[in-house]
Image (tube, rainbow, N blue to C red):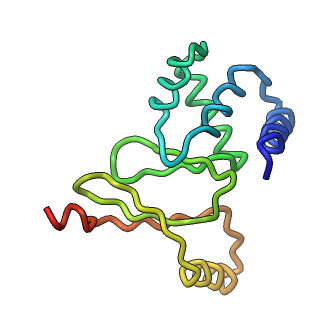
Amino acid sequence: MDIDLVKAGFTKYLKQGNYRITPERFHVLDAVLCFDGHFDADELYLRLKSNDIRVSRATVYNTLDLLQECGVVAKYRFGDNHSRYEKTFGKPHHDHLICLQCGDIIEFVNRKIETVQEEVCLENNFKPQSASLQIFGVCAKCRQQ
């Protein structure tokens, strides 16, 4: 998928929802697309500010909500008290291992888990919109210390 398609899709989503199409929202989108890995709203806000982009913290949070609704980002709670995000553009569906000591997040893909989720939904005549498996524990690096 091309970045221009992501922007076009976001524009279409905003129009369909009667949301204002503003340069600030697209600055947030551009910054999101530059992140590799997980980030929180404050990290995104600080990145925008450090690039001299004038945008309010509220606009960052509101735009992240819109980007989640239209499928550009996924929102997670990894056991802490704030949300973390990651772009879904160009990434396969995956799950997470979260280290309770150092906070590292290890992403993994497992076809067996995907198959079980599909089977459970099929058996229950359920149409999934998203799924997330999070396994909390201690990583190998922390166990060695």
Give the residue displayed 52% in from the left and 45% down from the top: 85
From the top left corner, tell me how far across and down residue 133 is, in percent. Answer: 48, 67
- Residue 16 pos. (x, y %): 86, 38
Q: Using the image as rendered, state which of residue 128 and residue 144 is in the foreground.
A: 144
Front residue of this view, candidates 118 and 87: 87
Q: Quadrant of the C terminus?
A: bottom left
- Return the residue nearer the eye: 25 or 123: 25
Q: Is 138 situated left or right of 5 in this image?
A: left
Count of marks overlaid on the render: 0
- What residue sits 40% from the left and 41% below the top? 82
Q: Where 128 falls versus 11 (above or below)?
A: below
Residue 61 placement, left or right of 102: right
Q: Quadrant of residue 123?
A: bottom right
* Image-quadrant location for residue 31: top right
Q: Image point 35% across, 43% down: which residue? A: 81
Q: Nearer the viewer, residue 40 or 50?
A: 50
Give the residue displayed 68% in from the left and 46% down from the top.
Answer: 72
Asked whether, in this view, residue 26 is left or right of residue 81, the answer is right
Percent coordinates x, y for residue 113 in the rendering: 54, 80
**Does 136 sit left or right of 92 as displayed?**
left
